[in-house]
Image (cartoon, helix red, strand yellow):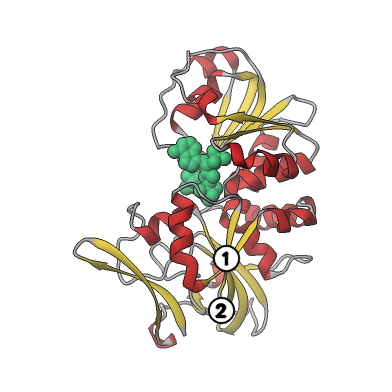
Amino acid sequence: MQALVLDQSEGKTVAAVKTISADTLPQGEVTVDVDWSGINYKDALAITGKGKIIRQFPMVPGIDFAGRVHTSSDPRFHTGQQVLLTGWGVGENHWGGLAEQARVKGDWLVPMPEGMDGRQAMIIGTAGFTAMLCVMALEDGGVTPESGEILVTGASGGVGSTAVALLSALGYHVVAVSGRESTHDYLHQLGAHEVLPRSAFSAAARPLEKQRWAGAVDTVGDQVLASVLAQMNYSGVVAACGLAGGFALPTSVMPFILRNVRLQGVDSVMTPAPRRREAWKRLVKVLPTSFYQQATTEVPLSEAVSAAEKLLNNQITGRTLVRIR
Ligand code: NDP
């Protein structure tokens, strides 16, 4: 079988598509014939070696995949069944989805939701699943379309694009933040009412600024998140899931203690199974069909490495889907 394999040579990560034996797959109850995977930010860090994601080599990257059950000793899954997987450390410390087969624990798999196919599932992927979790976090915090404007940062990336599309489909007034002029038309097509430049959020924020946002989905972190917090309405909610701009958070307690702002962290890796199923059901229901055409770049496995480099160079909009077979 063909697999993208990461090795280390003189302290550097080397990525190459290789033919490997299925016997070398790690232990697990379910072997899946992978049809689709994707390139997420974390995959890009792992494949290029620019982030310390992988600690054991050789490693097959790919933090998500969709495919069909090949064999299963877990009674919940049968041969031929369509399944998907995101998270659980797959593609980080357990061989992942950028290969023709993956062997994983049954507990990690989600049966393909009704009304969705494997290609659509991986256009959504970890990024889109995380966007749905962010939207659910805003809802949990009491944010409704009537509450006011919702800001999405890193808007033209995988998480951001899906968040814009979801929030717009749910009737929210969405304002997108993007560092690229070239993405503005795309973001309007996804449903953004307005697009603001990243530079408007890059300067050191005062502890409190003029209130504007009822909710925010932040994929960027650092100064951008600090600025967003300073501009939240009273009782506004920020769902913070990313660090595309950095992992620092140069803020103060002022938005929390004077404006009742809620900062809700969002993790997709260890999300418990019931919330996973709920999020995937909502994705099937809420995402418009047009999203799947608008937000996708499709590449074969042989181009996964160059796609990862492009993603880290901020040259990709939306999601990068990897066709495995
Ligand atoms: P992408 O690379 O697709 O998108 C990130 C976007 O952030 C870019 O498109 C760009 O948007 C913006 N951006 C890039 N570099 C910078 C920078 N230096 N400063 C400010 N903004 C920048 O990544 P994903 O959408 O896949 O992931 C986004 C973030 O979310 C990542 O940090 C990722 O690790 C995190 N993530 C977290 C998950 C979790 O479980 N918590 C799950 C999935 C992702 P634009 O050009 O429009 O400004």
Q: How crowded is mark 2: few (under 14 residues within 10 Å), some or many (20 or more)?
A: many
* Residue 156 visible to the viewer: yes
Of 19 and 236, which appears nearest the observer? 19
Mark 2 vs ligand 1: CB below 8 Å = no
Relative height, residue 160 to residue 277 (above, below): above
Q: Mark 2 points at which residue?
A: 32
Q: Name the residue under label 1.
A: 85
Q: What element carries label 2?
A: strand
Q: Distance between the residues labelled 1 and 2?
A: 10 Å
- What amino acid type should be assigned to the residue bearing mark 2? Val
Quarter of image, res 209: top right
- Residue in view at x 47 percent, y 77 percent: 28
- What amino acid type should be assigned to the residue bearing mark 1? Leu
- Residue in view at x 42 percent, y 78 percent: 27
- Residue in view at x 62 percent, y 52 percent: 128
- Name the outermost residue toward the front: 182
Quadrant where the C terminus lies?
bottom right
